[in-house]
Image: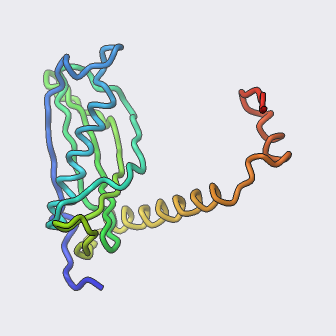
Amino acid sequence: MNTTFKTVTSSNISISELMLPSHTNFSGKIHGGYILSLLDQIAFACASKFSGNYCVTASVDTVNFLKPIEVGELVTMKACVNYVGNSSMIIGIRVEAENIQTGKIKHCNSSYFTMVAKDKEGKSVLVPGLILSNHNEVRRFCNCIKQIALKKEKDLHEEEFDYSSPESLASLKKYNVQLELH
């Protein structure tokens, strides 16, 4: 068990970047893949800052694209550690885009990355414990516990569920699919 603890605030990190035409997709909005790349960078920086170690992305648990981001907007990403395990951390990231002419800010994305701390040999290492200083931090930590439990339940369901049973196949009739199994 770790005896070192750090505050959530000690993990806080933010980055801002002006969105350029080179970042757009075919519809003229900022490409989601570009935003994902920035999200991975800030998750790495946040986890590494908190743990004091090199960190790798174990999973991208949630990425909710809420509103499109336009060329010329200033995108700011704010990240902090929401949960710690032994060597893993769940990093919560909020993405906001600001119209720099009007000052209007919109919440565009919320994301949760699971990062794992590694030593120089690539082995997982213990991360500091987390000091929760307010109810919002407690809420985020508890939501991560729920998220982890749901992920384990989904994985168990995947292992145990019989997709080829007559009941499972019959249940697909209410969806927009046509079965042509060979």
- At x 54% / y 60%, what residue is drawn? 150
Q: x, y (%) of residue 36?
A: 30, 38
Quarter of image, res 96: top left
Quadrant showing the N terminus: bottom left
- At x 69% / y 60%, what residue is drawn? 160
Task: Report the colour scheme.
Answer: rainbow
Position of 60 relative to 87 (above/below)? above
Name the foreground residue: 162 vs 110: 162
Q: Is residue 7 left or right of residue 177?
A: left
Q: Is residue 139 left or right of residue 102?
A: right
- At x 26% / y 73%, what residue is drawn? 130
Quadrant showing the C terminus: top right
Name the foreground residue: 140 vs 155: 155
Q: x, y (%) of residue 143?
A: 43, 62
Q: In the displayed orientation, state which residue is furthest to the top.
A: 27
Position of 57 relative to 18 (above/below)? below
- At x 52% / y 65%, what residue is drawn? 149
Q: x, y (%) of residue 83?
A: 33, 66
Quarter of image, res 109: top left
Q: x, y (%) of residue 47?
A: 22, 59
